[in-house]
Image (cartoon, helix red, strand yellow):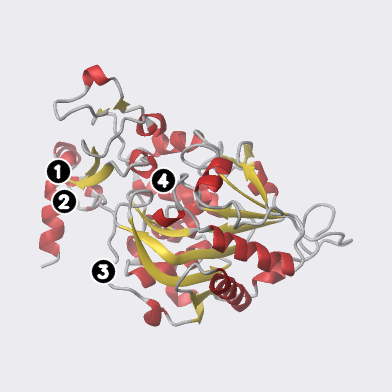
Amino acid sequence: MNPARVAIVRCRTYDRAEVADAVARAIELVDGTKLVRPVGPVGQVGHVGQVRPPSVLLKPNLLAGRPREARVTTDPEVVRAVAEVLRAAGANDISAGDSPGIGSALKVMARSGWDGVVPDWVRRVDFDSGRPSRTKDHPDLELSAAALDAGLLVNIPKVKTHAYMGLTLATKNLFGTVIGARKAQWHLRAGENLGLFARLVVEIAYSFRPGLIVADGVIAMEGNGPGSGDPRPLGVILAGDDPTAVDAVLCRIVGFAPEAVPTLAAARELGLGTPDMGKIEVLGEDIASVAVQGFRPAAQSPGAQGIGLPGFLHKLLKGALTSKPVISTELCRLCGECARICPPKAIDLDLDAADRRGRLPVIDRKKCIRCFCCQEVCPYKAIAVKTGWLAWTMRRNAGR
């Protein structure tokens, strides 16, 4: 079995010419344009009776409509560059879409700087129609019909921290093919079980035919990601054809242990992808030459179930061992996005029931499943993730 290939190319700014060169070089290193070749009437690559190039769907990270400078979404210059490379290679039917956490993909594109950057010949689509895509563990799974029907799905993630999954990279980006409110349903079904949700994310990622990945790591997000963190320059574009392989390399670049990232752990358990560095061929720059120090993670639960506590004691110490969302009195503007996105409906916007700290939404801690969807979508950075006191103490002592 050939090793997975991941290309690393330096790209320090979002200058159009620099991004175009870096993206083209990264795709060239992994021979990504080979995927744009004629397909037959039934949509299979290399089918006898080839008549047309495959349709191409670009899947960037379009979490929410924020300014480009916030670095919440995949930068439109990266999307443009990928589209230009594939068009030059022969693709003539290129679209881009997603299912954002808030609003439509079209609105998010407009608010995050696509107009005047991404060409008009790239059709903009909302993932608003799904169809069954059953897996062994999730027979009732439905995914975007547009993504499933694409001749070539191009995954264009943004490198960001994530309060629930640690990092959101290529594998997690394909969770965006779940339609709208159904994301909340899957969060609710997984509850506080990180491993269960990570397995779902991995199964979704490998529900699609092998495609192309181009990761936007020019300016990443650290800290309170994926929607309220701080921009952090990495200066890289990565390309590959396996999401877990790209994620494993990115973990090394930002200093995260791949085995500690739930999606990579789940991939190993499921036998999907290439999460192990020993099976990955790195092309272009060496990891050590582009690695950064002090990349700040999002606050995360230490995984109380993994430290050997009896069930009754884990339940007793749950609040002290796990992280939870907290709302800032100064920053909250009562927009209601947190309540709308919350899978278990644990957030109350009844101002008469606001707590004594001021006019804030109230979080029912008994209902809260700690998925941090509220923190993801808050447009005012008013929700942070607070680590339980015992978990914080354990981490501090472990670092001594």
Residue pointed to by mark 2? 391
Q: Nearer the viewer, residue 98 or 118?
A: 118
The crowd level at tag 1 (other Cα within 10 Å; few <14, some 14-19, many 20+) is some
CB under 8 Å between callouts 1 and 2? yes
Q: Nearer the viewer, residue 281 or 346?
A: 346
Residue wearing tag 3: 294
Looking at the image, which residue sits at the far top? 352
Camera-side residue: 80 or 291?
80
Residue that carries the numbered disc 1 in the rendered image: 320
Do tag 3 and tag 2 residues touch (Cβ < 8 Å)?
no
Q: Is residue 387 above or below residue 284?
A: above
Q: CA distance from mark 3 to mark 2?
A: 20 Å
Callout 4 environment at 10 Å: few (<14), some (14 to 19), or many (20+)? many
Residue at the spot 16% in from the left edge and 58% down from the top edge: 395
Asked which secondary structure carries label 2, the reply is helix
Furthest residue in direction right, as rendered: 49
Q: Residues within 10 Å of mark 3 (few under 14, many from 20)?
A: few
Q: Where does label 4 land, which residue?
A: 197
Drawn side of residue 191 relative to residue 317, left or right = right
Amino acid, disc 1: Ala
181 in relation to 205, above or below: above
The residue type indicated by label 4 comes to Phe
Dot placed on the residue nearer the N-terminal end, 4 or 2: 4
